[in-house]
Amino acid sequence: MSKYELQTRLNRVSLSSANAQQDLVTILLALRATAAQDWIIKEVGDLIAHRFDKDAGAISSNVQSLVLAFNFFKGLLDRTLSPAEIAAGLAHLVDRLEPICETALGMPYARAKSRIAHIGRKVSGHNGMSVLFKYPLNSTDEGLVRRLFSVDYGGELFDENELYGQFLSACRARDLDTDICESSSHLKRMLTLYVISLFHGLTIKAGDISCRVMGGYMTPPGQTKSIGVFTHYIWDGIPVYLPVFRTYTSLEGNCDPALMYLEGKLDFWDTLPLEISPDGILQLLEP
């Protein structure tokens, strides 16, 4: 597709809801070639091109990683882990925190990875959630282990600001002019709603677990209801909801009334297909 046609569609969807979904599909498919391999915006384009159950990609990897973390904690509670399994579990927790390691653990990922390998060689067993060591840990290593057991491992994979930033960067890599996009919030809203509709109802595979991706909303503490995307699966008989896509977009003015009946702190829409309506709101796909 020519640069002129892509620019025309980018300008149009920045200003108008008419044909927004069709324009976004075309642009996102074109951006697959210029988006970085590990960017979520590339996975969005891949999902448009190959709409089938996923067993690879960032979302699947995130769920697989979370399942491993949960299984590690369950093994500690069940008192069933060997020293080698504990060491491997600690190392996995550090790996899962790589993007936020400095904030969560107080040190760069490379250093945390090196320290946890050293700590792992000292593991002698465990007493429930308390890991036991052959030798006392120094204060730095003791603090690292303590932080590993106090972090939330179920955070969202990305948010709408990150998604939009990657979208604009991929557009610039195609030598598209993004000035009009940066001066208008309309495109960001359309992109957010479209990605929600794209992920909603998707089934992904994480090892032997099959997870349903579902759009709905959440109410963060002290904030208003905002639309989000979550994975739902059953872990050891317990329903688990993993946030995937965090937005700051409210239901009001962005969703059809049929999607605004939910009442809880966290709830989901039925797995019926969604689309962007001609007037730019999220709605159930019309038959």
Image (spheres, rainbow, N blue to C red):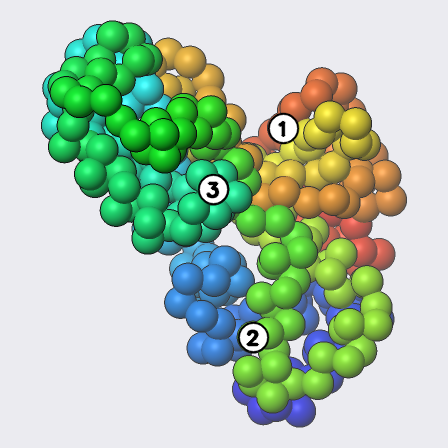
Q: Are marks 3 and 2 in contact (CB under 8 Å)?
A: no
- Of residues 138 and 228, the one drawn nearer to the viewer in this rendering: 138
The residue carrying pointer 3 sits among few (fewer than 14), some (14 to 19) or many (20 or more) residues within 10 Å by Cα, namely few
- Of residues 20 and 38, the one drawn nearer to the viewer in this rendering: 38
- Amino acid bearing label 1: Phe
Q: Which mark is residue 106?
A: 3
In the rendering, at what x and y percent does residue 150 appear? 47, 24
Residue at 27% over, 27% down: 137
The residue carrying pointer 1 sits among few (fewer than 14), some (14 to 19) or many (20 or more) residues within 10 Å by Cα, namely many
Residue at 48% over, 72% down: 35
Looking at the image, is 196 positioned above or below residue 225? Answer: below
Is 276 left, or right, of 49 in this rendering?
Answer: right
The Cα–Cα distance between marks 2 and 1, rounded to whole angstroms, is 31 Å
In the rendering, at what x and y percent does residue 165 appear? 63, 65
* Lower sequence index among marks 2 and 1: 2
Residue at 46% over, 17% down: 239
Tell me the element at label 3: loop
Looking at the image, is 88 positioned above or below residue 254? Answer: above
Q: Nearer the viewer, mark 1 or mark 3?
A: 3
In the rendering, at what x and y percent does residue 198 appear? 57, 51
Q: Which mark is residue 268?
A: 1
Residue on which the image places disc 2? 170
- Of residues 268 and 64, the one drawn nearer to the viewer in this rendering: 64
Is 187 left, or right, of 242 in this rendering?
Answer: right
